[in-house]
Amino acid sequence: MPDHVLRALARSEKKMRKLQTSAQERIHWKETDTHMLGLTPRLWMEVFDKKHRYASLVCLYWRRWQLSDSNDNFWDWLDYGMGSLIDLPEAPRRLLDEWQVMYLSREEQPLFRVVIEPSTGQFLWEADGTPVTLPKPPPMSGDMTLRERAVACRLAERLGKMDRRDALLAAAKREVETAMATREDPTPERLAAITGPLIKEGLFCQLRDPFFAERHDAASTPLGHCHHWTMPSMPETLLPVIGWEHVIRAIEHDQGKNMRNPMQTRDDRLKGNAIFVLDSFGPLY
């Protein structure tokens, strides 16, 4: 049998073993010293992830890892291996980086502890007795309670990164739209001036990576994606022949507009539902 056929069969068998392992995985639960069978990735990924990234986004990268030829474990592949260069349209790397679950310290827990008023069944914050509402994001307003102000301070650093990137993307889009309207030429100097601040933020991968779209799917050739190994890290410079329309597409990608449920603005990403946690001793958070 020809060598390229043998390599293709070996690749297929390797992928099948990955899929079989994930379908039959057993997770050791330390608290009960038992093994749990068949947990879906969304149930354990965020907990096992040291960065506690949003599981629905991480899971999409996990599916891509299953189809890869990597010998790395998933987390090493995602953060340090070839997976670190993948930026999926339906799960932008920018949002994967920003959407992280925040775990509360023992000192912070009282800020989120809830009591139920017996006479009305209403949920109240234990700290100040006010009705439970979603946290108010910065900037802080003058009518905030001490608890709301403390929560806003806790969120400020995390949301600040999102706000900074949103502002840079919006400013870049305005500049590009003005340039297109006035028929300004996309010179290398002008493109570098507009994209530079966002490249420093780790964005605009598709304007720098010659394999950007190719990375989204597993290779169908016997040699796989071995030619990607010639680029072990993301370049800091733009690809040649970049036009205004390429920059617009990159902006919309990093804004999350290609997701299944597009996220267009900061407010869109802050909308949604809250979750509650009931700990083993009874308090509700």
Image: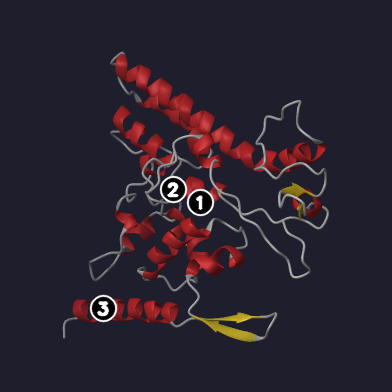
Query: Vertical placement of 11 versus 76: above or below?
Result: below
Q: The residue under label 1 is which amino acid type?
A: Leu
Q: The residue under label 2 is which amino acid type?
A: Pro
Mark 3 against mark 2, which lies toward the viewer? 2
Left or right relative to 12: residue 110: right
Q: What secondary structure is found at the residue carrying circle 1?
A: helix
Image coordinates of residue 46 in percent, x first then y, are 57, 62
Alpha-carbon neighbours of circle 1 within 10 Å: few (<14), some, or many (≥20)? some
The residue wearing badge 1 is 96
Identity of the residue drawn at 39% across and 54% down: 231
Using the image as rendered, state which of residue 106 and residue 129 is in the foreground: 129
Q: The residue under label 3 is which amino acid type?
A: Arg
Q: How far apart are marks 3 and 2 (CA)?
A: 32 Å
Mark 3 and mark 2 lie on one chain; the one further toward the N terminus is: 3
Mark 1 and mark 3 lie on one chain; the one further toward the N terminus is: 3
Alpha-carbon neighbours of circle 3 within 10 Å: few (<14), some, or many (≥20)? some
Q: Residue 92 — which label? A: 2
Residue farthest to the left? 1
